[in-house]
Amino acid sequence: MHPVIATLLNSPTSIATAESCTGGQLAAALTAAPGSSAYFHWGAVTYSNAAKRSMLGVSPQTLDCEGAVSDAVVREMAQGARRYSGCQVAIATSGVAGPGGGSPTKPVGLVWMALASAGGCVSFQRVFSGDRAAIQSAAVAACLDALAEHLAAVGAPAPVQPSHSPDPS
Protein backbone atom coordinates (compact mmCIF):
# COMPACT_ATOMS: atom_id res chain seq x y z
CA MET A 1 0.00 0.00 0.00
CA HIS A 2 1.31 3.45 -0.91
CA PRO A 3 2.36 5.70 2.02
CA VAL A 4 -0.07 8.44 0.90
CA ILE A 5 -2.92 6.24 2.13
CA ALA A 6 -1.86 6.77 5.76
CA THR A 7 -1.77 10.51 5.12
CA LEU A 8 -5.26 10.43 3.63
CA LEU A 9 -6.64 8.38 6.52
CA ASN A 10 -5.53 11.17 8.88
CA SER A 11 -6.67 14.04 6.66
CA PRO A 12 -10.02 15.65 5.86
CA THR A 13 -9.12 15.65 2.15
CA SER A 14 -11.70 14.33 -0.31
CA ILE A 15 -10.46 12.61 -3.47
CA ALA A 16 -11.98 11.90 -6.89
CA THR A 17 -10.49 10.10 -9.87
CA ALA A 18 -11.05 10.29 -13.62
CA GLU A 19 -9.31 7.43 -15.37
CA SER A 20 -8.82 6.29 -18.90
CA CYS A 21 -5.74 4.10 -19.46
CA THR A 22 -5.58 2.94 -15.83
CA GLY A 23 -9.12 1.57 -16.06
CA GLY A 24 -10.06 2.10 -12.41
CA GLN A 25 -6.79 0.88 -10.93
CA LEU A 26 -6.07 4.29 -9.36
CA ALA A 27 -9.45 4.21 -7.60
CA ALA A 28 -8.74 0.64 -6.52
CA ALA A 29 -5.37 1.64 -5.06
CA LEU A 30 -6.95 4.56 -3.21
CA THR A 31 -9.66 2.34 -1.73
CA ALA A 32 -7.49 -0.63 -0.76
CA ALA A 33 -7.32 0.41 2.91
CA PRO A 34 -10.11 -0.01 5.43
CA GLY A 35 -11.59 3.41 6.15
CA SER A 36 -10.90 4.77 2.67
CA SER A 37 -14.49 5.96 2.41
CA ALA A 38 -13.41 8.83 4.66
CA TYR A 39 -11.44 10.38 1.80
CA PHE A 40 -12.39 8.62 -1.46
CA HIS A 41 -15.72 9.96 -2.69
CA TRP A 42 -15.97 9.59 -6.45
CA GLY A 43 -14.41 7.82 -9.42
CA ALA A 44 -15.09 7.64 -13.13
CA VAL A 45 -13.55 5.36 -15.72
CA THR A 46 -13.99 7.30 -18.93
CA TYR A 47 -12.29 5.14 -21.51
CA SER A 48 -14.13 6.51 -24.54
CA ASN A 49 -14.12 10.07 -25.79
CA ALA A 50 -17.91 10.10 -25.46
CA ALA A 51 -17.59 9.26 -21.75
CA LYS A 52 -14.95 11.95 -21.27
CA ARG A 53 -17.35 14.47 -22.80
CA SER A 54 -20.58 13.38 -21.08
CA MET A 55 -19.26 12.47 -17.63
CA LEU A 56 -16.44 14.98 -17.19
CA GLY A 57 -17.31 17.83 -19.53
CA VAL A 58 -14.19 17.47 -21.68
CA SER A 59 -14.55 19.73 -24.70
CA PRO A 60 -15.15 18.00 -28.05
CA GLN A 61 -12.82 20.58 -29.60
CA THR A 62 -10.02 19.65 -27.21
CA LEU A 63 -10.48 15.97 -27.98
CA ASP A 64 -10.53 16.63 -31.73
CA CYS A 65 -7.53 18.97 -31.75
CA GLU A 66 -5.30 17.38 -29.10
CA GLY A 67 -6.44 13.77 -28.93
CA ALA A 68 -7.43 11.85 -25.81
CA VAL A 69 -3.80 11.29 -24.77
CA SER A 70 -2.78 14.89 -24.21
CA ASP A 71 -2.03 17.50 -21.61
CA ALA A 72 -5.17 19.49 -22.43
CA VAL A 73 -7.53 16.51 -22.18
CA VAL A 74 -6.12 15.14 -18.92
CA ARG A 75 -6.37 18.62 -17.37
CA GLU A 76 -10.01 18.91 -18.42
CA MET A 77 -10.65 15.41 -17.03
CA ALA A 78 -9.18 16.32 -13.63
CA GLN A 79 -10.97 19.66 -13.50
CA GLY A 80 -14.26 18.05 -14.51
CA ALA A 81 -13.91 15.32 -11.89
CA ARG A 82 -13.22 17.92 -9.21
CA ARG A 83 -16.07 20.15 -10.32
CA TYR A 84 -18.73 17.41 -10.61
CA SER A 85 -17.69 15.43 -7.52
CA GLY A 86 -17.25 18.37 -5.18
CA CYS A 87 -14.01 16.80 -3.98
CA GLN A 88 -11.05 18.88 -2.92
CA VAL A 89 -8.59 16.98 -5.13
CA ALA A 90 -9.11 15.09 -8.38
CA ILE A 91 -6.56 13.02 -10.25
CA ALA A 92 -6.85 12.01 -13.91
CA THR A 93 -4.99 9.65 -16.24
CA SER A 94 -4.98 9.21 -20.00
CA GLY A 95 -2.40 7.29 -21.97
CA VAL A 96 -1.37 4.50 -24.29
CA ALA A 97 -1.07 1.34 -22.21
CA GLY A 98 -0.42 -0.90 -25.22
CA PRO A 99 0.54 -3.22 -26.55
CA GLY A 100 -0.88 -1.49 -29.64
CA GLY A 101 -2.22 1.99 -30.26
CA GLY A 102 1.05 3.88 -30.12
CA SER A 103 2.38 6.32 -32.69
CA PRO A 104 5.66 8.19 -33.18
CA THR A 105 4.29 11.19 -31.25
CA LYS A 106 2.32 9.14 -28.71
CA PRO A 107 4.24 5.93 -28.10
CA VAL A 108 3.07 2.96 -26.07
CA GLY A 109 3.84 3.80 -22.46
CA LEU A 110 3.03 7.53 -22.74
CA VAL A 111 0.72 8.54 -19.90
CA TRP A 112 -0.52 12.04 -19.11
CA MET A 113 -1.62 12.64 -15.52
CA ALA A 114 -3.18 15.69 -13.84
CA LEU A 115 -4.07 16.76 -10.33
CA ALA A 116 -6.71 19.46 -9.84
CA SER A 117 -7.21 21.28 -6.54
CA ALA A 118 -8.21 24.71 -5.26
CA GLY A 119 -4.70 25.86 -6.14
CA GLY A 120 -5.16 25.00 -9.82
CA CYS A 121 -4.32 22.08 -12.03
CA VAL A 122 -0.90 20.58 -12.60
CA SER A 123 -0.16 17.96 -15.20
CA PHE A 124 2.79 15.82 -16.10
CA GLN A 125 3.66 13.03 -18.47
CA ARG A 126 5.81 9.96 -18.25
CA VAL A 127 6.76 7.27 -20.71
CA PHE A 128 6.73 3.95 -18.92
CA SER A 129 8.14 0.70 -20.22
CA GLY A 130 6.94 -2.86 -19.95
CA ASP A 131 3.73 -4.61 -20.79
CA ARG A 132 0.23 -3.19 -20.34
CA ALA A 133 0.01 -4.17 -16.68
CA ALA A 134 3.42 -2.65 -15.90
CA ILE A 135 2.50 0.62 -17.63
CA GLN A 136 -0.80 0.87 -15.78
CA SER A 137 0.83 0.02 -12.46
CA ALA A 138 3.59 2.58 -12.97
CA ALA A 139 1.02 5.26 -13.85
CA VAL A 140 -0.94 4.54 -10.67
CA ALA A 141 2.25 4.77 -8.59
CA ALA A 142 3.18 8.07 -10.26
CA CYS A 143 -0.27 9.49 -9.46
CA LEU A 144 -0.05 8.41 -5.83
CA ASP A 145 3.43 9.96 -5.58
CA ALA A 146 2.10 13.22 -7.06
CA LEU A 147 -0.79 13.19 -4.59
CA ALA A 148 1.62 12.66 -1.69
CA GLU A 149 3.77 15.58 -2.87
CA HIS A 150 0.71 17.78 -3.26
CA LEU A 151 -0.60 16.99 0.22
CA ALA A 152 2.83 17.58 1.76
CA ALA A 153 3.09 20.95 0.01
CA VAL A 154 -0.39 22.34 0.71
CA GLY A 155 -1.87 20.40 3.58
CA ALA A 156 -5.60 19.77 3.63
CA PRO A 157 -7.45 21.71 0.91
CA ALA A 158 -10.71 23.59 1.39
CA PRO A 159 -13.99 21.93 0.41
CA VAL A 160 -15.82 22.78 -2.82
CA GLN A 161 -19.49 22.58 -3.68
CA PRO A 162 -20.36 19.97 -6.33
CA SER A 163 -22.05 21.13 -9.52
CA HIS A 164 -24.42 19.07 -11.61
CA SER A 165 -23.06 16.57 -14.10
CA PRO A 166 -22.98 17.63 -17.73
CA ASP A 167 -25.95 16.62 -19.82
CA PRO A 168 -25.24 13.08 -21.13
CA SER A 169 -26.93 13.74 -24.47
Image (cartoon, rainbow, N blue to C red):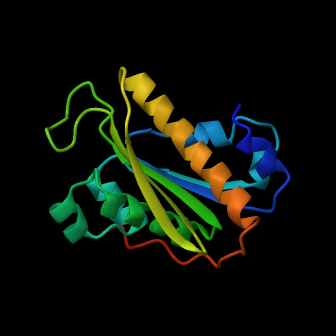
Q: Position of residue 23 (x, y in %)?
A: 44, 38
Q: Nearer the viewer, residue 119 or 21?
A: 119
> Could you tell me which residue is drawn at 59 percent across and 74 percent down?
119
Establish if 77 lies above or below 101.
Answer: below
Q: Position of residue 135 (x, y in %)?
A: 41, 29
Q: Nearer the viewer, residue 123 or 9?
A: 123
Q: Quadrant of residue 51?
A: bottom left
Q: Quadrant of residue 90?
A: bottom right
Q: Quarter holding the N terminus?
A: top right
Q: How many marks?
A: 0
> Could you tell me which residue is drawn at 51 percent across and 76 percent down?
164
> Could you tell me which residue is drawn at 60 percent across and 44 percent down?
144
Q: Position of residue 122 (x, y in %)?
A: 48, 63
Establish if 51 lies above or below 98.
Answer: below
Residue lying farthest right?
10
Establish if 84 lies above or below 129.
Answer: below
Q: Quarter holding the C terminus?
A: bottom left
Residue lying farthest top?
131
> Could you tell me which residue is drawn at 54 percent across and 45 percent down?
143
Q: Position of residue 136 (x, y in %)?
A: 44, 32
Q: Nearer the viewer, residue 102 or 48?
A: 102
Residue lying farthest front?
153
- Left or right, residue 25 beside residue 95: right
- Left or right, residue 91 beside residue 1: left
